[in-house]
Amino acid sequence: MLICLLKLTVSGQNNISRQQVILNAEPFETHIWTCDSINIWNNQNCGGKNIKTPFWVTVGNHTGLPYCWGGNSSLNAFDSLLLLGRSAGDQATNYGYGAEPNCTGGVDCSGFVSRCYGLDIHYATSMLNINQLFGHYNYWNQLRYADFVNKPGSHTRLIHKVNPNGSYDMIESGSGVGNVGFPGLYRVFYDTYNLSDLTDYNPQYYVYTDSLKLLDCSAPINLQCGIPYSRAASNDSSFVYSYGCNNWTETGPERIHEFVATDSNGFEVTISNFTGDLDVYILQSCNPHDCIGTVSSSSAILNNSIPGTKYFIAVDSDDGSGSSYDIIVDCLPPLGLVENVIPSAKIYPNPTNDFFQIDLEENQANLLMFDMVGKQVLNEMLLSQSTQISVEHLKPGIYLIKIIQGSSVFTEKLNIQ
């Protein structure tokens, strides 16, 4: 049985942003409408077509458009058809294809996707597969939000979000028959699919949506814990990036940094001294949909990191204006420790080349010292309020000192010359 059949049509070019595609799609699932008894048809003949209103439709208010085999109704058209006494959807998929608008209103899978892209003409699944308005990706990891997956002659789904774990949140109009949503849906709905659920589908896109570029991580800028880096301004706004952590879309330029985690405590990335609108993302791979951590306009936090793992950090501009900026990675203290709550701790001289002194208010503290690749170089128990530590054996460079007293930790960088 075919769920969405071939309908040969041609349409002109329609430029549309990915945000607008999603804005077009979501109201089909949230649209509120009222059904009267005249809108419920039970195997009623209409011009030689047998119409059956989806079983879940009753008299009263409803949310979300019903499935209609061959349907391509806009929201306004659907409301108007109800007032004219047409059936609220049609779940009879054995025959009666194309009963809308004379007999019924609603959308089928491809009618819904056509509406999402702002197309007035209904492109059925077979035409989505071969028409010049719709392209094919070579790889599944190229899919972005507002693209679609398509099984010619059967079903199509719009991608609402690509998740970091590789699954896809989709919105679609489905009957619930033959792997088209849950059994007995016959409506517009959301669902999540793994790649294994889509083996018969093609990864596709509408050619007049935004061009999304994969991130270029071929020459990332290395960041080390506690060492600030200054980045010059750039004004390349020719590409658009979509980040899966929040479905934000950024118009370049993009700058890629990398950071190798030194421990499992996590880290915070902060950008400063910039103009315009910059955002920072922590990525678990060189893919904008592998975004992890807490994201805000000028910082991102990852609370649990894997020692030795390389993380990518992307800094993007919303408006494409570009900006110079400073960026720094701060390594977080172990969970449960509060940083910088030992007010009397003093480390001097700094910089040094042979030794440094630690003065504490209380006895009994543990000193840990790390180089900038996360290797522990010192582990000392401090038994007095004043302790001198030799560093003559260490190479020149920046080191991270952590002094732990109970549930508190004091962190400071030491420069050995």
Image (cartoon, rainbow, N blue to C red):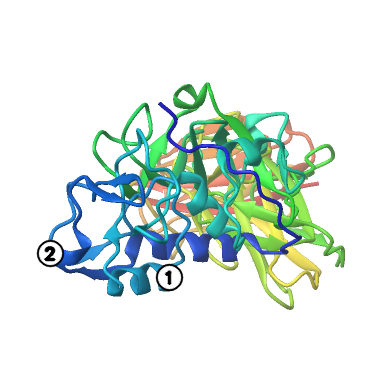
Relative image position of residue 129 (x, y in whole percent): 66, 36
Relative image position of residue 51 (x, y in whole percent): 28, 48
Mark 2 surroundings: few (<14), some (14-19) or many (≥20) residues within 10 A: few
Horizontal arrangement in the rendering, residue 12 relative to residue 4 (left or right): right
The residue labelled by disc 2 is 59
Residue closer to the observer: 289 or 183: 183
Mark 1 surroundings: few (<14), some (14-19) or many (≥20) residues within 10 A: some
Relative image position of residue 117 (x, y in whole percent): 60, 58
Is there any visible trace of residue 406 in the rendered image?
A: no
Residues marked 1 and 2 touching at CB (< 8 Å): no
Horizontal arrangement in the rendering, residue 188 relative to residue 272 (left or right): left
Give the amino acid at mark 2: Val
The residue labelled by disc 1 is 77
Q: Residue at x 44, y 55 (%)?
A: 360
- Helix, strand or loop status at disc 1: helix
Q: Residue at x 20, y 54 (%)?
A: 41
Task: Say if 334 sits above or below 309 in the image.
Answer: below
Give the amino acid at mark 1: Ala
Please identify the quadrant where the N terminus is shown. Answer: top left
Horizontal arrangement in the rendering, residue 293 relative to residue 351 (left or right): left
Q: Residue at x 75, y 60 (%)?
A: 12
Q: Residue 253's mark?
A: none
- Helix, strand or loop status at disc 2: loop
Q: CA distance from mark 1 to mark 2?
A: 19 Å
Q: Residue 140 lies in what quarter of the image?
A: top right
Q: Residue at x 45, y 40 (%)?
A: 304
Residue closer to the observer: 361 or 278: 278
Is there any visible trace of residue 144 in the rendered image?
A: yes
Q: Reading the chain from its start, which is encountered first: label 1 or label 2? A: 2
Relative image position of residue 388 (x, y in whole percent): 58, 44
